[in-house]
Image (spheres, rainbow, N blue to C red):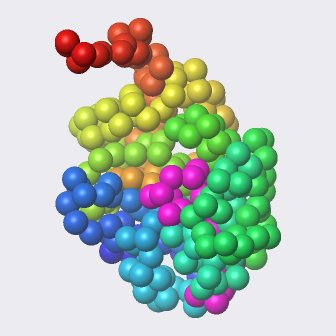
Amino acid sequence: MAIELFNNGKHSCIMFNDLVTGSAEDAVQANQFLIVSHGQGALIDPSGNITYNALTLAMQKYLPKKNLEFLFASHQDPDIIGALDKWLYSTECHLYVSQLWARFVPHFCNLNRADGRIIGIPDEGMPIPMLGSTLYAVPAHFLHAEGNFQFYDSTSKILFSGDMGASLVEAKTIATPITTKAEFYELLHTMSGFHKRYMVSNKVCRFWVNMVRQMDVAMLVPQHGRYLTGEAIPAFLDWIENLQCGIDLFSQEHYRFRPIAGR
């Protein structure tokens, strides 16, 4: 399903939520995002090989493939950019990714395919001009990758938040946003375990919350699950700000060698 998050006639943001087929045990559900601004296109976290053909077909309704100029990857995981070789082969676009991963992601590609096509984002982030708009790479390091970025669209005021805010739900439930504080807490069980394991520590969560509270965010749209609007956004910020996660929850007990008895 294509979900129109924003459209003012010249600038639109589209989310594709059900291109990963099979059961949840086979592959994690993932959202892909297309921004079309004055006829110029960008894909955020376009995912891997299992979505490439379906995404190519789905986006044709909104943008000729030849007009795709940008790929943005929040980090280096296969569900983010595993189909990089196909995108670089079939378009003239460039990939923006953390400078930490700029020399790693070419391993997704055939020899020399990525030469001159990978732009490393510095740790402090950067603005990327599009026709009639600006997309900002926003620091989100260790949430969950060492070099991690989210992307903020200045026109729609959408923060494409990667794994932050993710929920593990069925694709068919994603068409509508979480809008109220009550609904957020009702669905918290779909988020809690994911964030406790994939976010590195409460310290970086608090840094991120402090940054986002200074931004004008109309929607918080993660790469997995449902998106947040209205009072659900401050409710999420309050929750994640106080969450013990990642290394906060580990102890020496998690780092024990357990040899087989008698060997």
Nearest to the observer: residue 12 or residue 48: 48
Q: Is residue 37 visible?
A: no
Q: Identify which residue, 30 or 35, lies in the foreground.
A: 30
Image quarter hosting the C terminus: top left
Looking at the picture, how far across and down is residue 18, in whole percent? 31, 68
- Against 19, residue 201 (above or below) is above
Residue 87 shown left or right of residue 94 in the figure: left
Query: Magenta stretch: residue 181 in it?
Result: no
Please tell me which residue lies in front, 205 or 104: 104
Q: Is residue 202 above or below residue 184?
A: above
Q: How many marks on residues?
A: 0
What percent of the width, then of the height, locates residue 13?
Answer: 53, 70
Q: Which residues are magenta?
A: 65-82
Q: Is residue 66 magenta?
A: yes
Looking at the image, residue 245 lies above or below residue 60: above
Query: Could you say where residue 239 lies in the image, as x and y percent from the top left?
Result: 42, 27
Residue 84 visible: yes
Q: Residue at image x 61%, y 73%?
A: 110
Residue at (32%, 54%) from the top-left corner? 28
For this view, does 114 lie left or right of residue 62?
right
Residue, x 29% and y 47% (percent of image)?
168
